[in-house]
Amino acid sequence: MGPKPLEGMFGAVAALLLLCLPARAADLTLFDGKSVAAIVTDGGIPIGKAGDLLARDLAALSGRAPTVAKSAEGAKGTLIIVGPLDAPLIASLLKANHIAAAPIAGKWESYGRAVIPSPADPRQKALLIFGSDVRGTIYGVVDLTREMGVSPWEWWADVTIRKVPSIRIDGALRYSREPSVRYRAIFLNDEDFGLKPWAAKTYEPAAAPSAPRPMPASSS
C-alpha cells in the first residue's frame, strides 16, 4: 500500500527544504595531535599581547608551543591571523577573499571570523579573526579560547587547562553582535583584605602586605 497523498506531500517538502539549506562549513583543525596552528598578529602591542595569550592557551591545551609572528611569510601549516579591520594585513586578506567588513565596521567591540586559504600557502587554511576595534579583536581571540575549552575562570579561580588530543572549531563565517553593555569593568572592593594576600601566595610574592607599623607610645 503506497503512502497517503498528504504524507507524500510532506515528505517532498521536507526533502526540498533539506536541499535548500546551506551546507555547514567544514570544521577547522587547529591541533591534530602533532602540529599546532601558528599565530600571526597585526595591529600593535595590545593585539600582540592577545596573540601571546592565545599561544599560551594553545600550548596548555596541546602540549605544543605555537609560533607567534607579525608576518605570515615563511609560515607553515594552519594559521590563526588576528587584527583589527584597519590593519594592513587584515584589510588585504578581507579584500582578497571577498569577506564583507560592513557587518561590524564602525561598531563597538565587535569581531568577525572566517576561514580562508593561508596567505603563506594556499594549500593550507587560516582562521582570520578581525575586529571593529582593538577590544573587539581581543574579544574575538577570547571567544576562540572559550570554544577550544579554556574556562573563563582559568585565571581568577585557577581552573586548570586540561590537555586535549585535538582541537577542532567551527569554520563558518560569523560576526559578533555589539555588547549590550557598552562600558564593562570590574571594581575590587577591599583588595587589601582579599586580593593582595591571594597574590602574595600565588604569582606575586612582592605583593605581600608589610607588617603594620607599631603605634607610637602615648606621651601622657
Image (cartoon, helix red, strand yellow):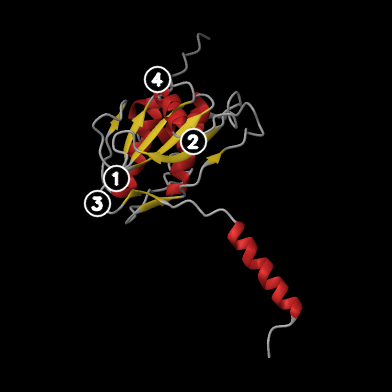
Q: Nearer the viewer, residue 183 or 73?
A: 73
Q: Which residue is mark 3?
A: 34
Residue closer to the observer: 182 or 81: 81
The structure residue drawn at horizontal position 58% and vertical position 26%, both measured from the top left corner, is 105
Mark 1 and mark 2: Cα distance apart in space = 19 Å
For disc 1, the marked residue is: 36
C-alpha separation, residue under disc 4 versus residue under disc 1? 24 Å
Q: Where does label 2 land, which residue? A: 140
In percent of width and height, residue 45 lies at: 39, 21
Q: Earlier in the sequence, mark 3 or mark 2?
A: 3
5 vs 107: above or below: below
Q: Residue at x 49, y 28 (%)?
A: 192
Q: How many numbered marks does the figure carry?
A: 4
State the residue position of label 4: 44
Mark 2 crowd level (few <14, some 14–19, many ≥20, 10 Å Cα): many
- Which residue is pictured at 64% across the width and 27% down the height? 182
* Earlier-in-chain disc, 1 versus 2: 1
